[in-house]
Image: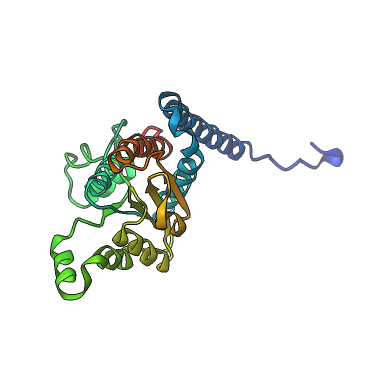
Amino acid sequence: MRRGGMRAPARNTLGKRVGACHVERTMYFMSNVQMVWDSLIAERPALAPTLGDLQAAFSLLLDCFQRGGKLIIGGNGGSACDAEHIAGELMKGFLKPRPLTAPEKAALMAAGDDGSIGAKLQRAVPVIVLHGLPGMSSAFLNDVEGSLTYAQQAFAYAKPGDVLLGISTSGNAGNVCAAAIAAKARGAKVIGLTGEGGGRLAGLAEVCIKAPATETYRVQEWHLPLYHALCIALEQALFGGDAA
């Protein structure tokens, strides 16, 4: 009671407790993300110079997914295989099972699921690989310009809030760079995953992760642990808690 018999306004202690719990959970997940970076560098010290850019790429992608955006990935040859590998780690459980939340299961039930679908689906983020439409790509190659098939798709898919990841060991793959330009024109951010020099792609990207090698196969050998760490960190940050 205040002086004069007036009751002091009630404090919103519940809101403070809920807010504190949210902060604690966030700090817990972020501390686990830091463990991902620490483990990567401990096991592969040569990647230490890439850590700042790797963390910046993580922040871009985390913001993208948390705001409902999607990841678009383009690469050629082995880098196209890496694009599919990354998509596979992000669109299903990687190190975690990622069970659906109660609202997601309820939405499936409302759509006609008897429970068997919701019991097996996993939480995911949207990823598109640019070499996955052979019909469209071959038509554009035949009718217009083959080196711009990635750019055509990026221009169609990309929107503000999205991220395009361009993978090129030299950083100079013409079709990947063209896709980066098209995505930027549509308001998306660009991340490059390249070899040591970064090439032209480094100049087009907001962030460029440069593997410490120049020979193609050596660059690709470094790309695997880099994007695995990125996918593990994203999974921890996005799906680290129990399904609600």
Q: Residue at x 80, y 42 (%)?
A: 6
4 and 193: which one is in front?
193
Against 199, residue 52 (above or below) is above
Residue 159 as seen in the image, left or right of residue 127: right
Residue 76 higher or lower than 150, as above or below: above
Query: Residue 40 sits in which quadrant?
Result: top left
Residue furthest to the top in view is 42
Q: Name the foreground residue: 186 vs 82.
A: 82
Position of residue 104 measured from the top left corner of the image (x, y, whole percent): 30, 45
The location of residue 196, given as percent across then percent down, is 42, 44
**Which of these two is toward me, 220 or 129?**
220
Residue 45 lies in what quarter of the image?
Answer: top left
Image spot of residue 18 (x, y percent): 55, 37
Number of labels in the image equals: 0
Locate the N terminus by quadrant: top right
Q: Residue furthest front?
A: 215
Choose top left, top right, bottom left or bottom right for residue 41: top left
Residue 132 pos. (x, y %): 19, 56
Outermost residue on the right side: it is 4
Q: Residue at x 16, y 43 (%)?
A: 114
Above or below, 34 against 216 in this view is: above
Quadrant in which the C terminus appears: top left
Task: Report the side of 15 relative to 100 (left or right).
Answer: right
Residue at x-position 33% and y-position 51%: 168
- State how the image is colored: rainbow
Query: Residue 108 vs residue 233: left or right?
Result: left
